Amino acid sequence: MGEWMKAGQMQEVVPSQRYNAHLVPEDGTLTCAEAGVYVLRFDNTYSIFQSKKVSFTVEVLLPSAEGQPHLKKYKYLGTTLK
């Protein structure tokens, strides 16, 4: 952990797949079984002529000194993929 890796060296947790997000917005969740560094990758290569607006929320449970996990929530709205 803490060392730079190329995408090909990383372990894929959820396989990359094509979504028809132009028809229906996509929604999903992933619960990570192990602590570590997780990378979110959004890819628009199937649609080179149509940009996409991406919004997502990431919730992270961090350990605390009291033993109860502490919830950190990150929200990112309006990233455009071209």
Image (cartoon, rainbow, N blue to C red):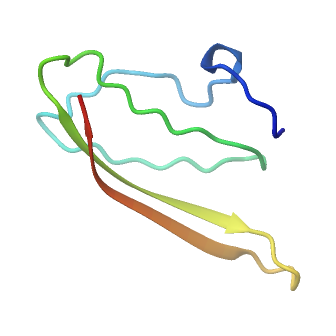
- Residue furthest to the bottom in view is 66
Q: Residue at x 71, y 43 (%)?
A: 37
Of residues 48 and 61, which is closer to you in this image?
Answer: 48
Q: Name which residue lies at 19% across and 17% down.
A: 48
Q: Based on the displayed image, in which of its 4 quarters is residue 77 positioned? A: bottom left
Q: Is 34 above or below relative to 7?
A: below
Look at the image and tell me in which quarter the C terminus lies: top left
Residue 27 lies, with reference to residue 70, above or below; the image says above
Nearer to me, 81 or 64: 81
Residue at image position (52%, 23%) is 15
Position of residue 80 measured from the top left corner of the image (x, y, whole percent): 24, 41
Image spot of residue 6 (x, y percent): 66, 19
Q: Quadrant of the N terminus?
A: top right
Residue at image point 73% right, 47% down: 33
User: Which of the 4 image quadrants contains residue 19?
Assistant: top left
Q: Is residue 21 left or right of residue 68?
A: left
- Residue that protrudes farthest toward the front in the picture: 4
Spot occupied by residue 34 in the image (x, y as percentages of width and height): 78, 46
Q: With respect to residue 3, does 28 lie above or below?
A: below
Residue 71, horizontal then vertical, whole percent: 62, 74
73 or 67: nearer the eye? 73
Query: Seen in the image, is 4 located left or right of residue 31?
Result: right
Residue 25 in the image: above or below residue 58: above
Residue sitting nearer the eye, 73 or 3: 3
Number of numbered callouts drawn:
0
